[in-house]
Image: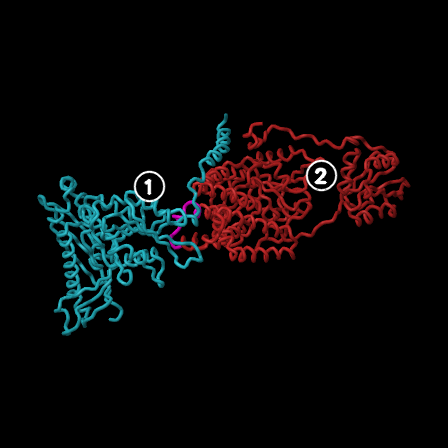
Chain colours: A cyan, B red
Amino acid sequence: MSVTGILRRALIVIPFTLLISGCYDRLDMEEASFSLVLGLDRDEQGNLIVYSSIPTFNQHAKKKTHEIVVSSISPREGRLKSDAYSVGSFQPRKLQVLVVSKALLLHKKEWDRYLDVFFRDGRNPVTSRVLVYDGKLNELFDYHPPDKPILPLQLLGMLESTDSRAETVVTTLQQLQRELLDKGQTPALPQFALDQELKLNRTALLDRDGRYAASLTSKEAMLLRLLQKNADKFRFTIPVPKHLVEEPGAANVLSFSADQTKTKIKVSRKGDKFRYDIYVHMPVNLTEILFPIDVVVEKAELEAACSAEIRKQLEALISKFQQKRLDPVGFGVYARAREYGYFKQVQDRWVDEFAKAEFNVKVNVVLADIGAIE
Amino acid sequence: MRITSWFGRKKYAHTSKPKPYVASPIAASEPISDQLEHNLLHLGQLFTDTPDLNIRHIPLRDTGELAALVYIEGLTDKNAINNNVINPLLHRADGSSLSSITVGRITKLRDWAPITSAILKGSSILFIDGQPDAFMLGTEGWPQRAIEDPQMETSLKGAHQGFVESIEQNIALIRRYLPHRELKIRNHQVGRRGDSRVGVMYLADVAHPEVLREMEERIDRIDIDVIINTGELVELIEDNPFSPFPQFMLTERPDTAASQVAQGRIVVLVDRSPSVIVGPSTFTSFFQSVDDYSTRWSIATFIRLLRFFAFFVAISLPAFYIAITSYHFELIPVKLLLTIGEYRGSVPFSPFIEAVFMEITLEMMREAGVRLPAPVGQTVGIVGGIVIGQAIVQAGLISNIMVIVVAFTAIASFILPNYDLVAGVRLIRFLMMIAASLFGLFGIVVSLMVLTGHLIALESLGTPFGSPFAPLRLSEWKDTFVRAPLWKMTKRPHSTRAVQSTRQGDNQPEGDGK
């Protein structure tokens, strides 16, 4: 048979063979109950409680979401149980946000095994954001303010706006998995709480075992992002030394925005001690000064003062990391890149090595723009 | 018969000889008699039940012989017969009677076959007693339409003359654009009963002789009663009759036809039909319109890109909607998902049923609009607009989003300049929808691949239909997705297989760019 003859036959046969296997995974959108927010919490006895929030597509329904709470031994079993409560077929395919309660992170050993289902089952998304909730998850899933959009949109919006100011980290499931597995790094997650309203102003740091260890404030998170080099737009409000303030009683505070920040991190080793040279170049635009000063005349002093303050804050943050044995920046990644052989030897106790490391921070603030009024 | 051969196409053999013309057996090649009575008797036998056959007896003034003028009323020009034939024969005595006839064309005929055929085609025949020859007088004249704007292919800047139903006029319309002696026309007759005159027009020093021979052979092979319209001829000569895509372009614009001839293509005109065949055609030629060449090239390029975009939208948008909402809703951004979900939530049908229902409604409305007379046609618009646009959504039968999808698809298919291509697109759209409802995006991708493969495999007159994409000729992309400035297109397209490839010299205007 000629080649075209074979092709022609194949063209006829292929559609029919496809028909045999088709349709099996078809699920019309309106027949699915897709959970947009999934919550993992533990009760007093230490059992897993799975929360989910599902949008309801019924124009007659008053409430726009449907919340399901089940107690189960694993997230996958939770899904099966949730299916009993949901109107349509329960689907985590469009999961936007995974909320993990702080209590679970603190008390449950190896809680990260719960994430296994997201990576083992290909239908589950790995780009959902992971957030830490400081409190009981039932408060969160019962929170339906009339003046706000539904919970997933609220959380995503909050996360996006906070991220645009670099005031917290954004961690997807996949990224969290990587940070958990990477021996040269410890994970960081955005942390929010319900205090009358939802507020996202902390960043939770997890230790080597994935347990909750500490939280960062917005300002610290900004410096963390600066060290992580994954943001370059920052808004700082910092105090300056008193001697620059001529008028007594005035607040010694100024604000600036830094849009093209560059961070360089160099690692070297002396014996069994790592040494990091961190250089931050920061052209800034002044946006606010609360004391009288001739910026043009005292430019050099002002730059030096700002550099010193940022440096002080960076050093404080790093020593906090060292104290708590946390490496959310991933200094170990640098060590592995530059000092591979030695890192391999110490990688299992990297955080202790990190705690011993010496840091030398240099900050160079340059006044690029002093503002429009002068 | 093997099932595969049913899908196969017939290969045209180059060696085949055209079949000889077989006339009606009654008067094959019998010569006429020199006796007028015998001839009229024979004529009466040939033309029974032909009330419109007119026989006028005329005594010739100069010799006194009896003559008879035979013609069919309605097919002949009454004025010409009265003033140029009968009047001089009856009243003018100077010289011989024949030389007093003042029509342009007089041919001597001896056999009955050409005589009957000439009568039926509007000539009048003069029999003279005692003469062994009859005279065919060119007195054709039948009801004709005036030359009007083309109906299907309107243009903003192009000429406002469209082809009409007479081949002579159509040839004249093209000749006006190309008054060159290399513009040749070869006549063929198609149809045993219809006996249509089919003219193959080409530029002798540009068109490829092999392509021309292929076209002529295909026309000569046709053995059929009658061809009413050009579309019928196309179906008999195209390369792959099972394809939903047209492989010959049909146009009713003389300017389009002339520009295609000038590019080295061949134009086939069919008598009594107001559209002509252009071949060999390529896929891209269905995206070109005359206006492209008279608007600024940057704007024409933009419109070209719109058309290609519209082609894909018209083929796959409803299918895409089905695939996304039935299989892959995780691909929809979450806010859009919530919006779509809100509308879909109250619709009782699955997306596929919804889409098929709306698309069929659209196709019915379009078909209704085509067939209805203009004043009634407006009603279709109102009924369709109100019923489909509003009521169906308010009743909760169809979602808003689906209405938008259908409307967008319809507009996309209106952008495409060629009706035959759009017809193919409309059909394929449904196949795509079925594929999408069975296999989701996977089905769409596979369908698009099969479609691309099919388009590449198509041929038009033995030349590749996909040119210049497959086979790839980058230098000819100047008239595909983009319409390059005219002075850039110095070569004729390869797909025409023109033997003279240079189209123009260096015409780039002097200026900054040069």
Q: Nearer the viewer, mark 2 or mark 1?
A: 1
Give the residue number, with chain letter if any, for mark 1.
Answer: A121
Q: Chain of mark 2?
A: B
- How far, Cα to Cα, is label 2 from label 1? 70 Å
Q: Given contact means CB atoms under 8 Å apart, are the residues at marks 2 and 1 in contact?
A: no
Q: Magenta region's main secondary structure?
A: helix
Left or right side of A296 for B236: right
Q: Nearer the viewer, residue B266 or B464?
A: B464
User: Quarter of the image containing the C terminus of chain A?
Assistant: bottom left
- The percent position of residue B33, horizontal first and vertical second, equals 85, 32
Would residue B271 be found to the left or right of residue B113 on screen? left
| Type of amino acid under label 2 | Gly
Crowdedness of circle 2 by 10 Å Cα count: few (<14), some, many (20+)?
few
Residue B142 is situated, as x and y percent measured from the top left of the image, at 75, 47
Which residue lies at the image location 28% right of the left edge and 58% below the top edge?
A162
Q: Which mark is residue B194?
A: 2
Which residue occupies the extreme left position in the image?
Answer: A271
Q: Nearer the viewer, residue B144 or B356?
A: B356
What is the number of callouts on the image?
2
| Percent of width and height locating residue A10 | 48, 31
Question: Residue visible at 67% across and 33% down?
Answer: B223
Q: Quadrant of residue A163?
A: bottom left
Q: Is residue B204 left or right of residue B79?
A: left
Range drawn in magenta? B324-335
For mark 2, give the secondary structure.
loop
Residue B279: image x %, image y %?
58, 40
Tell me, yes or no, if residue B435 can be seen here. Answer: yes
